[in-house]
Amino acid sequence: MASVRITIVFSARQGVPEASLGKAVEVVGARLEALFPGAEAMNARWAQLEITSPPPSSFYSATVPAEEVKRVLASLHEQMDELGIVQAYVPTPARMAGANLALSSMEDLPGSRRSLAGAPGPALLTAQPGGKQDTYAATPDYRGLQGWSLKSRVAWNNVWLGDPQDATGKGIKVADVEADMPLPGHESLSGVQVQPILSGKIPVGSLLNDIYARCHATAVAGVIAGKGAICGLAPKIDTLFVSRAAFGPVSAAEPATICDAIWEAALKLSAGDILLIEVERRGPPAPYDLGTHIKYTLGGPSMEDIPSMEDVPSMEDIPSMEDIPTGRLHRYIPVEHLPEDWTAIKVATAVKGIIVVEAAGNGGENLDDEVYDQVPPQQWYPNGGWIAAPGTWENPFRAGSGHDSGAILVGAGAPPRGFGGRDWGVYRSRLRWSNYGSRVNVQGWGRGMVTAGYGDLQGGVDPARWYTGAFGGTSGAAAMVAGMAAAFQSSLGPGIKAKGPEAVRKFLCANGKPQEGADAQAKHIGPLPVFTAAANCLTSTSPKPQQMAANYVSLFKQISP
């Protein structure tokens, strides 16, 4: 019998009374467990920061049979005031934030079943007699294809991101929320301390344990801290923690425990460290069934909302598979849309002072859409549900609303033309499947990234020597920004107080290379962070592109913590 986890959020701000918990257990018919164990210790700090949302100690979960979900939510809704409940919902499914990595029509992308390890492996030099291991050629040097400056580390120089100078990531820890660990023993990560989080808390068999998930984690790790044949943007970071979120395919009944992965990662890090979120959650249905975006209400669409036959688009207006952002029936949005994930992120940024970098998602969705101002309707999640007391739903994507997680949201922009052997359009323009809006802060490259894993650049029988030239999505973009954030923080040197989350976010938003493209104003994903720039750059003192040189590593050292 399938079971489903329900999250229940109480209104109590100093710990939920035992009486309220007991009554809720009777209504739900199952045991309630604290979603954030030990969170009561943070209540005082939460109140001191004047955060209006319920503190982490107010979040509980219960596991019920799938057929009981609607009854439980209905019963909770009837007794919300009596129980002191502000919200209850079934957490939405999640997946890795790599866009279009499973479309069969895009074989050149690393997620395609046809391209996994599809490239030739290292050449066999000699067959050893007597059953000894064969000798293979060394992996080629792919650093010249990566596109970021390594002037101070190797002999050649490529200046798309400028000169990092002394910004190498040294002294900084990074945690990455993923579906699984990187490929074991990958040669590009041999000098990196990779440590798992949650290894003792995740039930056996609940991880994807899929080579594609492991390649995704490997590719992200390569972008941040790779060595040897590639070079990460922060190759000297102290430790890379991988906090594994236990979720399966999108159709699985058991949702992701992403909030637990974020929470545990935050507990491992210190102020100024980097927490990267590489997953996205299911959002509204994709508006392609009739070519129109029907706005649902809690009661379902009215007859006025359903288009007439005259409104049905012609075949020319119906998008091709390449234009459909996910190739599925739902958009995908940042994880912070879910209150429990937002709360875990807020703990990391506001309470712990950690820099959180979050993938904006690959739904091609306008995060400024007013649909996010309301509680997600039943039509979004037919197998789930969501209830909220009046006035308790807060839109996390409404910039300036006061309900700000503090995370840096990263959209996907076009890399320089020619990367990955393709023309991706105007450099730093929004890629069509990247989410956008005023809440999206900065961009990273969303296509053609050279890093470890997958095997479409170098394949062969040994996954520890696989490399790709086609990583991307907001996964790749967020990994890029996380690596640069770690590098910037390390430039301060030992003994100097690290910059806080808000200071780092403001710096990245106000500096770098501006977004380009015809829709740059209407579909905002923000500037591209760089280390130095010769011209056409933004600076904190001027919101318009300047024809001047800028050294952002030096500027970063001067900003207030």
Image (tube, rainbow, N blue to C red):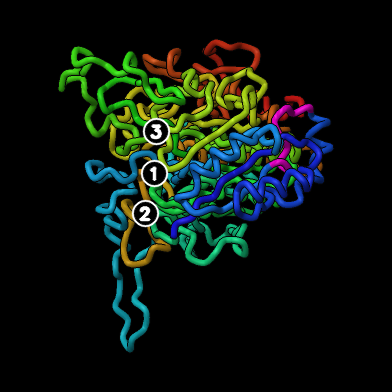
- Which x, y percent locates residue 423? 29, 30
Q: Which residue is mark 2?
A: 454
- Which x, y percent locates residue 73? 54, 40
The reply to whether the magenta stretch includes residue 131 is no
Describe the element under mark 3 as helix, strand or loop.
strand
The CA distance from mark 3 to mark 1 is 20 Å
The reply to whether the magenta stretch includes residue 56 is yes
Residue interval drawn in magenta: 50-58
The CA distance from mark 3 to mark 2 is 25 Å
User: Which residue shows up at 75% across the image and 40% down it?
Assistant: 352
- Which x, y percent locates residue 429? 40, 23
Q: Which residue is mark 3?
A: 331
Q: Which residue is mark 1?
A: 471
- Which x, y percent locates residue 241? 61, 54
Q: Nearer the viewer, residue 383 or 425?
A: 383
User: Which residue shows up at 29% across the image and 78% down it?
Assistant: 127
Can I make out residue 497 in this image?
Answer: yes
Residue 371 drawn above or below residue 12: above
Image depth: mark 3 or mark 1 in front: 3
The CA distance from mark 2 to mark 1 is 9 Å
The disc, 2 or 1, on the residue closer to the chain's N-terminal end is 2
Describe the element under mark 1 as helix, strand or loop.
strand
